[in-house]
Image: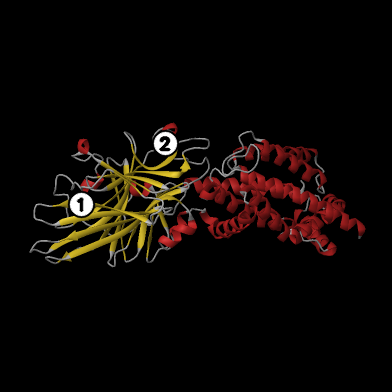
Amino acid sequence: MNLLKRNFFTIIFIFITFILWNTWNNNELKITNEQHEKSYINIHTKKNYSFVNKKKYVNLRNDVISVTINQFGGDIEKVILLKYKDKLYSSKCFHLLDTTSNFIYHAQSGLIGENGPDNSIYKKRPFYKTTSNIFELNKNSTELTVPFIWKDTNGVEYVKSFTLQNGKYYITVKHIIKNNTKKPLLMSVFGQLKQTIKLPNQKNTNFKIFSLHTYRGAAYSTENTKYKKYDFNAINKLQSLSITTNHGWIAMIQQYFISAWIPNIPKINVIYTKSVNNHSTATIGYKSESIYIAPFTNYTFKSNIWIGPTIQDHMVLIAPYLNLTTDYGMFWWLSQPLFKLLKFFYTFIGNWGGAIIAITLLIRAIMYPFTKSQYISMIKMRKIQPKIDQIKKQYNENKQKISKEIILLYKKEKINPLKGFLPLFIQMPIFLALYYMLINAIELRHAPFIFWIHDLSDKDPYYILPILMGITMLITQYISPNIARDPLQKKIMNIIPIGFTIFFLWFPSGLVLYYIISNIVTIIQQKIIYYGLKDN
């Protein structure tokens, strides 16, 4: 069989094996033996509060997000991303956090502990008052701060404030305790993300789960672990997570979008997970150490929450390693520099499809020496094929002798058969890195190219690009040196482009574009190499 096509078979086999393995084994789960602290309040993990029919909401808005807060407890129960559409061609904005009859996704926070108003001993959470139910940040202002105020019967005043800035997807949340009594108070702050594990009907949800692999679940970062995924299966079936750390964050991740609590507390925090409502809801959160608040003094707990797209350059400024939540899989070390290079080309070209073409040309230019070596090796292999056939015929019943004589022939002709594999082994991780980059980088979501391609992260709606790719493969195969002699092998080689075309029908159009340009460059490089060899 043609050496090049045999290598293609190898690549496709490895690629499919990798995808299948990655789909079923997304994460290697690390389980801790620490026990969850007993002081965690169960009221925050119940699906319905006792005051469910008394909910009142306050809406906060800047130019990029609309945030709906429940005055009972001050939890964020709905977030609409104003700059992102629900679907391509849709006029509806993307709902990240939401509350429906069969699905919830909330960002909760409060004060617990011995004197915390959100302690589970109370039947309901505090009702915070505001001066209005709608607050919108003026374009001429730098930030909007909205205080939510509640006083208990003892005279302690609690202020839970939310601060938004224009163009920012993070919210600063402060819990201010004004102890106006003669008694000291003991309490701690918590922040958690709660989400229904099972998605509702796909037609009624804003989650897009790519057919091959994207991660949806929890994640966290500690002072000892930069980034660790902890999926819903682990939260549901394994021991509750409990990790003590001085720094870090907790998050809920899905394709393109994330919510993450980042505590800004100079104390030890406990990161925990919990499964509730008969294992239908997963929770990940943090809880601070208990703090004594002396009589007639104030104390402030501060934290940030990012609720929005996974814009890596912005997230890393909010918290260390938060940018790692743009999940590029095992080839993250290659996807990240490739994405930076892609962004570099985009700044000049202004089109992500054009940037993909530019990065393809650069990769092929760098790989040209390896490609040249590959085709020279293939041509030499074709030339000595009659000698190999003669060896096989001469030592028909002695396989050891055949192998030994063929190796001696390779040495005599100065041929290294492995050179034909090297360029393809180099291309395979690049191919996979681009694949994960295209389906996870928010910048490429709904990114248009030309004509009918309006989303480079999704398949070609008319399958034109995969067909063009199949044509380029046929041309490449036609002009490649062919060492196949068996009729069956030749038939298999002719079927390969058809198989690849079918396989690529559902791939992101940006990846298919990369492969088309790569094939075109290969055709040109083959002509140049063969022309040079003829002259010599």
Q: If the image is split into quadrants, where does the C terminus sit?
A: bottom right
Q: Secondary structure at mark 2?
A: loop
Circle 1 is placed at which residue position? 149
Circle 2 is placed at which residue position? 205
* Quarter-of-image position of residue 489: top right
Direction from residue 407 to residue 146 in the image, left or right: left
Q: Say if residue 239 shows up in the picture.
A: no
Marks 2 and 1: in contact by CB < 8 Å? no
> Which numbered disc flags the more N-terminal residue, 1 or 2?
1
Residue in front for this viewpoint, 509 or 89? 89
Does residue 495 lie above or below 285 as drawn? above
The percent coordinates of residue 495 (x first, y second) are 72, 37
Residue type of the residue flagged with mark 2: Thr
Direction from residue 444 to residue 282 in the image, left or right: left
How far apart marks 1 and 2 lie (CA) works out to 34 Å
The percent coordinates of residue 70 (x first, y second) are 26, 44
Dot label at residue 450: none
Q: Say if residue 140 shows up in the picture.
A: yes
Direction from residue 411 to residue 363 in the image, left or right: left
